[in-house]
Image (cartoon, rainbow, N blue to C red):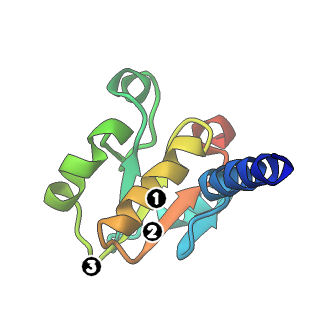
Amino acid sequence: MEYVNYLVIVVILFFLMKRFLPTKGVNTISTIELKTELNDKNKQFVDVRTLAEFKGNHIRGFKNIPLHQLDQKAEKELSKEKEVIVICQSGMRSGQASKVLKKLGFSKVTNVKGGMSAWT
């Protein structure tokens, strides 16, 4: 019985770590670093917040592809040849989006830590 309890705890910890640890191969930049990247034509900028959030406030040059639509739209609207820089409100959804993009075969993915909440 005690063995089963340990096993359950290990499985739960594994899934928590997998969800919250950074995705292998995904770069992370600050909003300050983002400001130096915005004019780079070889990069794609994606805001994964909802349309309402995006309309309320967004950074010029970012394309809105809400996280729940990323699976369907990424390969049609983004190039795998260019780096994709992803932002959301706090960095959590963009972290999830980074995982989705890596699974879809995008090799150059960067997450903006702190998201729009850190943008000044």
> What amino acid type is highlighted by mark number 2?
Val
Q: Residue 19 location, x and y as percent?
A: 60, 52
Mark 2 or 1: in front is 1
Q: In the rendered structure, are the residues bearing label 3 and label 2 in contact, judged by CB atoms less than 8 Å apart?
A: no
* 56 relative to 47, above or below: above
Q: Residue 34 location, x and y as percent?
A: 57, 59
**Residue at image location 75% in from the left, 49% down from the top:** 4
Q: Which residue is mark 1?
A: 98
Q: Relative to 75, is 114 on the left or the right? A: right
Q: Which residue is mark 2?
A: 109
- Say which of 119 and 87 sits in front: 87
Q: Quadrant of the C terminus?
A: top right
Mark 3 or 1: in front is 1
- Say which of 42 and 6 sits in front: 6
Mark 3 element type: loop
Marks 3 and 1, Cα distance to the nearest angstrom?
Answer: 15 Å
**Residue at image location 59% in from the left, 43% down from the top:** 92
Q: Residue 66 location, x and y as percent?
A: 34, 37
Q: Which residue is mark 3?
A: 81
Q: Residue 101 location, x and y as percent?
A: 36, 62
**Residue at image location 32% in from the left, 40% down from the top:** 64
> What amino acid type is highlighted by mark number 3?
Glu
Q: Earlier in the sequence, mark 3 or mark 2?
A: 3
